[in-house]
Amino acid sequence: MTTSEATLRELYLDLVKRSLTGALAEDNDTILGGARSVGTGTLGEPGLNRATATQALKRGAHAAGRLANKFNLEIAYKRPYSAELREVGQDWPSRSESMIGLRRMDNIQEAIATIEAEDVPGDLIETGVWRGGATIFMRANLKAWGDTERKVWVADSFQGLPEPDAERYAADAGDTHYKWSGLAVGTKIVEHNFRRYGLLDDQVEFLVGWFKDTLPTAPIEQLSLMRLDGDMYESTIQALEPLYPRLAPGGFCIIDDFGSHASQAGQAVHDYRAKHGITAEIIPIDDFGAYWRKS
């Protein structure tokens, strides 16, 4: 490999990840009725204090935004862009394909470079893809390395997160992610996002449905990288149980929500590792994500 080839790869991947995370466009608008909408509600409920009234006003504003969307209109207000927050994925871009930030994108890039250099066998998967940004970046990395063998598996319900099953997974009691309409992104939108980057081809496979239904029977022989982004205990443990046994030695297990949802996704990781005697060092990526390599 020549220096120029390596430089071109770095330039291409840097451009793609900055576009996917919204860092390139400094995307930080809030679109009323858009991705940051949470729940529903109206003013006039009895006993509203100032805080709940403010929330009700916000819900009313988002309802107006959703109404505008029906007429192909958009209501947005500008928010100051923070390069520091986008670096570590602690804000939420309104239009971009990923909310994980640049540091967790760097982690994907570095992991795939290691996989290619060490010839670790197996495909790549993300469980919980939102608009597809991380999986699009996985496919871009394979393209940049000239890898025509590995597949990228895109696993999601494509209808948001499940309502918590507190009887089976006590750590998820009270979780409200299932109400977050902005997390429900359909398959066609994610496919379109892949296509926009010129990366939708036969090396991309979609697994559509709840993890408990799709992952145990997914036709995946071996993995070199598994990236879990399910927030909840249930979504994390239901991905670890069928997928980790298929992770090749030297492969990467990345947990997007290890720190940000320590009592849910993080606890599922600790429970699974303890049950199976996994002692590989967990390495933090930022305050949210972490990973380890299978020994």
Image (cartoon, helix red, strand yellow):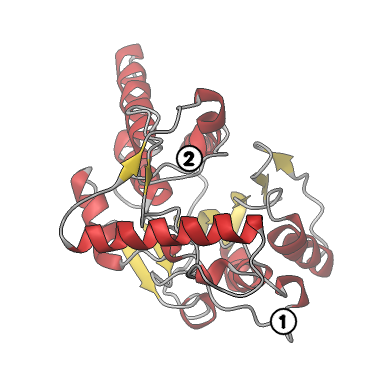
- In the figure, 75 relative to 152: above or below? above
User: Looking at the picture, which amino acid does disc 2 mark?
Assistant: Ile
Label number found at residue 190: none
Whether residue 230 appears in this view of the structure is yes
Which sits earlier in the primary sequence, circle 1 or circle 2?
2
Whether residue 202 appears in this view of the structure is no
Side of 228 relative to 147 (left or right): right
Circle 1 SS class: loop
What residue sits 39% from the left and 51% below the top?
135
Side of 86 relative to 61 (left or right): right
Judging by the rendered image, the residue that carries numbered circle 1 is: 166
Side of 260 relative to 92 (left or right): right
Q: Residue furthest top?
A: 3
Label number found at residue 112: 2
Front in this rendered view, residue 47 or 1: 47
Q: Residue 281, percent across and down?
A: 78, 44
Q: Residue 97, percent across and down?
A: 36, 46
What residue sits 73% from the left and 61% below the top?
269
Q: Within the image, what quadrant is residue 129 found in?
A: bottom left
Q: Residue 24, percent across and down?
A: 34, 27
For label 2, count other residues whose C-alpha is less than 10 Å away and answer few (under 14), some (14-19) or many (20+).
many
Circle 2 SS class: helix
User: Looking at the picture, which amino acid does disc 1 mark?
Assistant: Ala
What residue sits 33% from the left and 21% below the top?
11
For label 1, count other residues whose C-alpha is less than 10 Å away and answer few (under 14), some (14-19) or many (20+).
few
Front in this rendered view, residue 227 or 75: 75
